Image: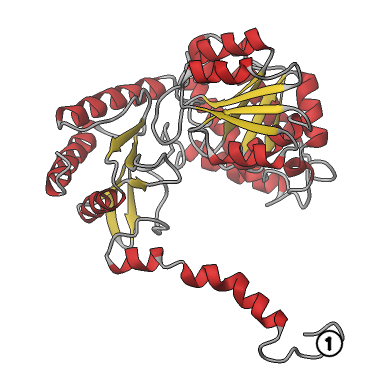
Amino acid sequence: MTDKGVPAASGTRVERAEKTLLDKCRRFTRVEELKAAGLYPYFRCIETAQDTEVVVEGRRMLMLGSNSYLGLTNHPKIKERIVAAVREFGSGCAGSRFLNGTLSIHRELEDRLAGLVGKEAAIAFSTGFQANLGAISSMVGKDETVVVDKSDHASIVDGCRLSFGRMLRFRHNDMADLERILKGLDSSGKLVVVDGVFSMEGDVAPLPDIVRLCERYGAALMVDDAHGVGVLGETGAGTCEHFGLTDRADLIMGTFSKSLASVGGFIAASREVIEFVMHHARPMIFSASVSPANAAAVLGALDILQDEPERRARLMENTGFFKEGLKSLGLDTGQSATPVIPVMVRDDIRTFKLWRVLHDRGVFVNAIVPPAVAPSGSLLRLSLMATHTRPQLERALDVVGTACRQVGLV
């Protein structure tokens, strides 16, 4: 349409501009090529609850690709708690926390989360992605700097981009490179952000060294513990508890969608930091609240985390057994020290082929290629649950060994 509401003639500048915008969509043929080759591994439809076994397109599969580390997403006590919350509060909050969407269940949840990770206060976001966007973008202002690990999660990078500050990146877990960057910065505000557990490789940030460098150069520290909460630490409080550094990390971020059996995320810190984030984080102010059902699920998961420490013990037993089994097959599992275990393939097409063989043999895993990992860092991401049985893991090792031999990985 023209400015006066008259349809634009064919071939006008308006029409050509529209076609130019959409050209990139027409050129994007990678998905169709992979589907035609039977090697497209994404957006598979799961027809049952996330558990150690799932049904995909009518076929039962062994699940080795879920982030439900404690195996709680189908727990009956959690489902009962969700039902009770929906009966009390309804299905949603109909607004943002800033205006009409703060419920008593949110306050209860935030008190529990702050207590879990040893901080004065916490604030819950609708997703973990939004938690990182909101915290980083609100904390890092103009003329300030945020320094991140090159393997940090995409939500951290996007939070940096949303801020008005400068983003600098150091080589993965390379303390000499981090010090080089911090040493070169002036006295303006500095925030270092790292994953506690890196989501693709399963390795752990060297927090003691990072804390020392932050304190030496006057930088605040934020730890994204999405994959650490519920897994590491004496009580499952995460990476900071694991290293005994809770008091020396300024902000701790966590998600609900891994060990805590729900959807959402949180930031925990001192009371004044949380007050600042609450009143400056755009993803908090301009997005709807965590639903009552999701909040209730987390509360139920926190109860189980506290009452059943044996779940974490079983999770680590399963992790040790499975990792040793993979190594005995001659596979490279990188520096993983957690239930996230990579099988390093380092070639995109071979990664897709290995995924396909495992899928056909009834084992659900995740194929990871750049940009989710570094160039030449393609891998299969395997993840374990506390509820996997030893026979399930033995069967998985047998299938993985056969598949790796079939594609020439070993």
Q: Is residue 123 above or below residue 403?
A: above
- Residue situated in front as seen by the camera: 292 or 288: 288
In the picture as drawn, the residue positioned furthest to the front comes out as 184
Give the quarter of the image for residue 262: top right
Quadrant showing the N terminus: bottom right
The location of residue 99, given as percent across then percent down, is: 85, 44
Q: Is residue 153 left or right of residue 192?
A: left
Seen at 52% across and 43% down, the residue is: 79
Would you say residue 327 is visible in this rendering? Answer: yes
Q: Is residue 359 left or right of residue 115?
A: left
Give the quarter of the image for residue 108: top right
Residue type, mark 1 in image: Gly
Counting the numbered discs, the total is 1
The location of residue 322, given as percent across then percent down, is: 25, 29
The location of residue 140, given as percent across then percent down, is: 73, 30
Which residue carries the number 1 mark?
5
Seen at 66% across and 43% down, the residue is: 126
The location of residue 348, given as percent across then percent down, is: 31, 50
